[in-house]
Image (cartoon, rainbow, N blue to C red):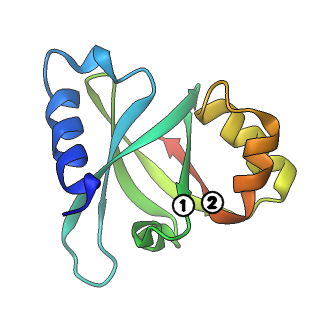
Amino acid sequence: MKASDLYNPMVKLILHSPLHSLMSGGTMLLTFTGRKSGKQYTTPISYAREGGTITLITNRKHGWWRNLQNETLVTAHVRGKDLHGKARIVAANEAALVAAMEKVYRGIPKEKAKQLAPEVMLIKIALN
């Protein structure tokens, strides 16, 4: 059993509960439709929000991000509210990835962000 088999359901439960404020300042739920299966998926993910844009970072090894290769309609469950928008993968150089990681993972050392940059995908959600 993987840690995510326990962690993800627990985080989903908390973020949909009245106790969401324990985690919702830095973690949200992203709901999207599988491009091949047509099924809806929901995954917890760290985020940073600036106005009408949400920034997400995920490891390339997690395959779910491939569902967002074209501009994709998504639901972002942020701070207890469902927000709708279009997600897209952003091609970014190291500097842009490091800056995004510093926003999403508040307090991450710059050297650690530089080390992780080749392994991550940058996703932006433009909210409606």
Q: Where is residue 125 in the image (x, y as percent from the top left)?
A: 52, 47
In percent of the image, x 61 and y 61: which residue is there?
A: 121
In percent of the image, x 18 and y 16: which residue is there?
A: 19
Going by the numbered disc 2, the residue's amino acid type is Val
Which residue is at the front of the view, 41 or 8? 8
In percent of the image, x 86 and y 49: which residue is there?
A: 95
Marks 2/1 in contact by CB < 8 Å: the verdict is yes
Instruction: Name the residue tied to disc 1.
Output: 59
Instruction: Name the residue tied to disc 2.
Output: 120
Which residue is at the front of the view, 72 or 22? 22
CA neighbours of label 2 inside 10 A, class few (<14), some (14 to 19), many (20+): some
Q: Position of residue 47 (x, y in %)?
A: 50, 36
Asked if residue 106 is positioned above or below residue 100 in the image, the reply reads above
On the question of residue 46 being in view, the answer is: yes
User: How far apart in space, not on screen, are marks 2 and 1 (Cα)?
Assistant: 4 Å
CA neighbours of label 1 inside 10 A, class few (<14), some (14 to 19), many (20+): some
In percent of the image, x 25 and y 61: which residue is there?
A: 2
Going by the numbered disc 1, the residue's amino acid type is Asn
Which dot marks residue 26? none
